Amino acid sequence: MSEQPDIQAPQIDPEGVDPKVVEAMIVAGIPHCAALGVKVVAVSRKAVTLALPYNPDLVGDPVHGVLHGGVVTSLVDTVCGMAVFSAMAKLQAIATLDLRIDYLKPAVAQKELHATAECYKLTRSIAFVRARAYHPEAPDDLVANCVGAFMIGSSDKPPLPKGTKIPGGVA
């Protein structure tokens, strides 16, 4: 497993979730993202884009040069969750309730894969997201399309990188 990068823990804005907190969760707070090499491309209130660089260890079909489907699923689930965090007014724990992924074509293993998600509906207890996975040189030629639902408040403790300061204490 790779070492966690040395990043400064960001402050949480009480007026809303700071995109830097979301980025810190991806870079330092989710071990499987570190193991897969997931990189942050963009984080905003409207959408999150993550990238999965080429890694020969993630090839699922070496004969045809196809990325493993579980890696695509992990990237899509993560970007959806991060889109929920980015849309929330305050940071709360979430859990994936439903994730439907339509695989439209194989992800070429030798190319970077991007995934972009947006939270299009946020209620008190459920967030609804949509996402797409694609190779950045052909963003309209989708590898996968996704819709999902996430439970808000699934735990009393939000998933923050160690050392992130929150009002009233440290995570």
Image (cartoon, rainbow, N blue to C red):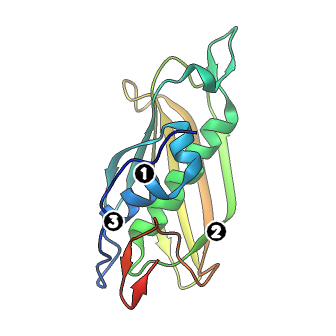
| Residue at 40%, 25% in the rendered image | 138
Classify 10 Å Cα crowding around label 2: few (below 14), some (14-19), many (20 and above).
some
| Residue at 56%, 40% in the rendered image | 35
- Left or right position of 145 against 8: right
Q: Nearer the viewer, mark 1 or mark 2?
A: 1
Classify 10 Å Cα crowding around label 3: few (below 14), some (14-19), many (20 and above).
some
Q: Name the residue tied to disc 2.
A: 95
Q: For the residues marked 1 and 2, what is the alpha-carbon distance in whole angstroms?
A: 19 Å
Q: Nearer the viewer, mark 1 or mark 3?
A: 3
Residue type beneath disc 2: Ala
Q: Position of residue 53 (x, y in %)?
A: 45, 29
Q: Name the residue tied to disc 1.
A: 27
Q: Name the residue tied to disc 3.
A: 9
Q: Secondary structure at mark 2?
A: strand
165 over 141 or under it: above or below = below
Res 109 → quadrant: top right
Camera-side residue of 53 and 5: 5
Camera-side residue of 34 and 137: 34
Camera-side residue of 166 and 22: 166
- The answer to whether any part of residue 7 appears in the image is yes
Residue type beneath disc 3: Ala
Q: Secondary structure at mark 1?
A: helix
